[in-house]
Each structure stands twice: as C-alpha cells, then as structure tokens.
Image (tube, helix red, strand yellow):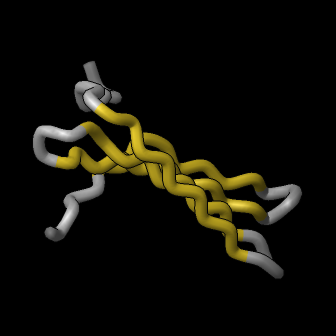
C-alpha cells in the first residue's frame, strides 16, 4: 500500500537552522498517519503517529 502524504505545516527557523515539516496520510477505512520530520544541521528526527478511525484534517478550510 502506497500512502499519499499531504503537507500540514512546514516551518524554518533562521536562528537555529531547524526545519520542521508535518504531513498526514489517510489509511483507507482505518484512520490516518501523522508524520513529523525535524531537520537540523546535525540531526534528522522522524516521528509517526497512527490515529485510528479519525477523519482527515483539512488545513485549508
């Protein structure tokens, strides 16, 4: 199963040089995944959370 991720938030801090990106993917009939990735000059961190039975979040409306 290939998931289609939709961007929820993408931010960059000039002072710390850290970029944070949060995305969501709907898992058919089961819920959705939230993936947050933190990029820094020295590290990369990823966190994925599954939320069962939830409706997808619409960041625009």
Q: Quadrant of residue 29?
A: top left
Question: For this view, does 21 lie left or right of residue 51?
Answer: right
Measuring from the top left, give residue 11's x and y in whole percent: 60, 49
How many marks do you count on the picture?
A: 0
Measuring from the top left, give residue 58's x and y in whole percent: 27, 27
Q: Residue furthest bottom?
A: 42
7 above or below 45?
Answer: above
Q: Residue at x 87, y 56 (%)?
A: 15
Residue 18 can be seen in this image: yes
Q: Quadrant of residue 1?
A: bottom left
Question: For this view, does 35 lie left or right of residue 2?
Answer: right
59 above or below 7?
Answer: above
Measuring from the top left, give residue 5's x and y in whole percent: 28, 56
Residue 58 can be seen in this image: no
19 above or below 34?
Answer: below
Question: For this view, does 36 lie left or right of residue 60?
Answer: right
Q: Residue at x 28, y 50 (%)?
A: 25
Measuring from the top left, give residue 3's x and y in whole percent: 21, 62
Q: Residue at x 66, y 54 (%)?
A: 12
């Amino acid at each position: 199963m290939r998931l289609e991720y939709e961007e929820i938030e993408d931010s960059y801090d000039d002072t710390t040089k850290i970029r944070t990106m949060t995305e969501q993917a709907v898992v058919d009939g089961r819920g959705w995944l939230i993936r947050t990735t933190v990029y820094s000059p020295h590290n990369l961190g990823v966190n994925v959370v599954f939320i069962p039975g939830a409706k997808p979040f619409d960041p625009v409306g």
